Amino acid sequence: MTNEQKQFLVNLVNTPAPSGFEEPVQKIWKEEVEKFCPDISKDVHGNLTAVLNGGMERSIMIVGHSDEVGLIINYINDDGFIFVRPIGGIDPTILASHRAKILTKKGPVPAAIGRTSLHLLTAAQRDKKLEMHDVWLDIGAKNRKDAEKYVSIGDPVIFGGEYEEMTNGMAISRCWDNRIGIYIVAETLRKLSKIKNLKNTVYGVSSVQEETGVWGAGNPAYNFKPNAAIAIDVIPSSDQPEIPKERFGVTKLGLGPVITRGVRTNNKLADELIEASKRKKMKIQIDVDFGHTWTDADPISQSRGGVAIGVVSVATRYLHSSVETLSLNDIDLTVDLLAEFVSKSKLEY
């Protein structure tokens, strides 16, 4: 990726946007994509759809979701400590001692996610698994009335750090899941916009609220009626300790895009993706679905009379945490794979 593309990626991952509160990151995506694909529409829930080469006989939708997991304030006690509920799937045991930001209408408010000091815990308390109701936020408030000057019930919260590069082309971020999806959609559109005589219409979607129900992308699919669709997402990598390969298969960072084959994904479409990778002499990995992909492809597959779907993912470690880790090269390869597939496929399923 160029320096400009990397800055676009960094802006996406550093911008807070939990599920239901995606507008800030959607604004960044729209401002970049409209430079080469100005036909962009927004639906009532906030899904953005960019239309490239409109009016062709056959069409494909490529979609990533813009939202991330987070927390939401649901109670402030008399001492000014703040209690939360999850936005999306979060393991409460990873939250203690993180820094957090509460996203208020007046701007972000810094917070500490509290945990009783080890010096004050009994042996039984040390062994107790944290539940979400055991988690509290501390903004330094004197009491509830003081806290309410700064935050409100219903304010969303993010936790964890921002983009940082590691060794060997790896990078760490709070929310690769799934800012890389909308980045890949944008960069695929950018590549396709330079192709003369593109035969298909391409709908590039930055969807909302995937983490809280996997439903948002169904709306643009219903509205635009594509012949096929590919969801771009992350997938848990198995190249770390304690993950049994017999149960989860093998997915590794740096070994290329992960193509899903199985029950709900269209097998002909998956085969075409694999053939596209061979034409590009690109390494790929294979994952399987057992009837659900747990991505935006699922609601799209059921839209109207049904849509042929595929899933292409980027292997990522430590999902739904503040230290999600992946290979930057895998992102670039995924863009190349999708551009090759879309530009050559007849979309006949």
Image (tube, grey):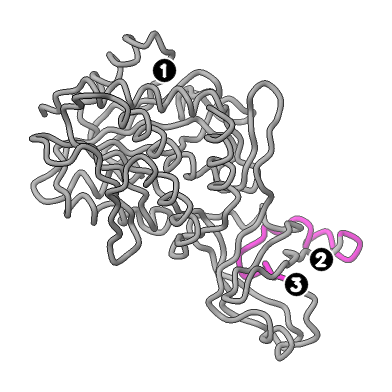
Residue 128 colored magenta? Answer: yes
Nearest the eye: 21 or 99: 21
Specify whether 60 is left or right of 136.
left
Determine which residue is flagged by label 3. Answer: 138
**What span is in magenta?**
118-138
Q: Amino acid at mark 2?
A: Thr
Q: Residue at x 47, y 44 (%)?
A: 178
Q: Residues within 10 Å of mark 1 (few under 14, many from 20)?
A: many
Q: Are marks 1 and 3 in contact (CB under 8 Å)?
A: no
Determine which residue is flagged by label 1. Answer: 284
| Mark number, residue 116 | 2
Q: Are marks 3 and 2 in contact (CB under 8 Å)?
A: no
Considering every residue shown, the one lying at the far bottom of the view is 145
Where residue 327 appears, as percent x and y from the top left, is 57, 27
Is 331 placed above or below 81 here? Answer: above
Specify whether 115 is left or right of 215.
right
Residue 1 colored magenta? Answer: no
Where residue 303 appears, as percent x and y from the top left, is 16, 50
Where residue 206 appears, as percent x and y from the top left, is 37, 49
